[in-house]
Amino acid sequence: MLAAINIGNTHIAWGIFEGSTLTAHWRLATDPRTTSDEYGVLCTSLLERAQRSTQSITGAVLSSVVPALTGTMVSMVETYFGCSPLVISADCDTGLILKYDNPRELGSDRLVNAAAAYHKFRRDLIIVDCGTATTFCAVTQAGEYLGGAIAPGLGIAAEALFARTAKLNKVELGRPRTVIGTDTASSIQSGLLFGYAGLVDTLVRRIEREMGRTSWVVATGGLASIIAPEASTIHTVEPFLTLEGLELLYRRSQGRCPSP
C-alpha cells in the first residue's frame, strides 16, 4: 500500500492507495505544534479503524506547503510507516514542462494538481483549487505549465469579514435562496458565494484569453463542492485530484508510469 499525504495550510489530506485505487482517506487539522508522535498515533488509529495496518504500507509520498510541518511528517512516516517518503518538489519528474520563472517558488500542491489533471485529461487545462487560497493553474495540451493566479480563499475572506466588522456575525457558508439578501445572514452568504463564483469565472476567462483558446476547467479542494455549482466556467470537480496526483508522481519516480 502507498500512503499519500498532502499538507495544506488548513488541513492535512491523506489516504491509502492499493495499486492505483484510493481505498481510504482522511483529513486532519494542520497544526505545526503537533508532534510527529501525536500525528503517528492518530494516523495509526485511523488505519486500524479502516482495518489496515502500518506494516502493510510499502511506500509513501508527501506534498507540503507548510515548511514547519514537513520535517514532522517525514519523521512520522519514517517512524510509524517504516519507509522514507518521496517529498514532492519542482525537481521531481512531473511529466510537465515548467514555464514558471522560478519553479522552486511553485507550491508543490499546484504541481501535483497540474500533473494529475494533465495525466487524466491530456488537453488545455485550467485547474482551480478552492482551498485556504484559491489558486489557478494553466496547462497546455503539450504539457506546458504556464503559471496561474492566487487569490485569498473563500474561508479567509469570510474570516476577514467577520473579524473586521463589528456588527456582522459568522454565518454558515451556504447558498442563499436569492442573490438579493433579505437579511444580514443571506446578504453575507450571497456576497461570499456568488462573489467567489464570479471571481473564478472572471479569472478563468482572462486566463483563457491570454492562452488564446478555451480550456477544460477542473476544480478541486475542500470548497470546490460549494463554489463549482455557482461558477459557469467549471466543467468537472475532482475532489481527490491532489492525492491522485501524489500517487501518480510516486509511480513516475519508480519508473512505473508511462511518459506522456
Image: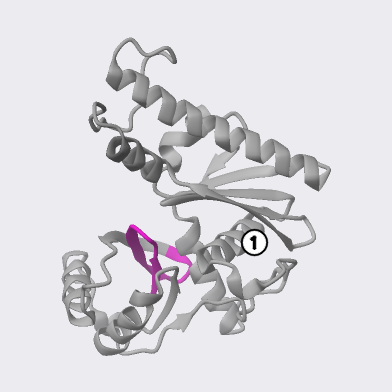
Image x and y of residue 72, in percent = 30, 81
**Is 39 placed left or right of 131 in the picture?**
left
Which amino acid does the dot numbered 1 rest on? Answer: His
**Percent x, y for residue 180?**
42, 12
**Residue position marked by numbered label 1 in the rendering:** 119
Residue under the image location 29 percent in, 18 percent down: 184
* Residue stretch rendered in magenta on the structure: 1-21
Residue 234 visible in rendering: no
Q: Secondary structure at mark 1?
A: helix
Q: In the image, what residue occupies the spot 43% across and 30% down?
A: 193
Q: Is residue 36 left or right of residue 157?
A: left
- Residue pictured at 52% horizontal, 32% vertical: 197
167 or 65: nearer the viewer: 167
- Is residue 16 within the magenta segment? yes
**Residue 149 position within the rendered picture, expressed as x and y whole percent measured from the top left:** 62, 51
Quadrant including the C terminus? bottom right
In the image, 184 versus 236, the foreground residue is 184
Residue 63 position by quadrant: bottom left
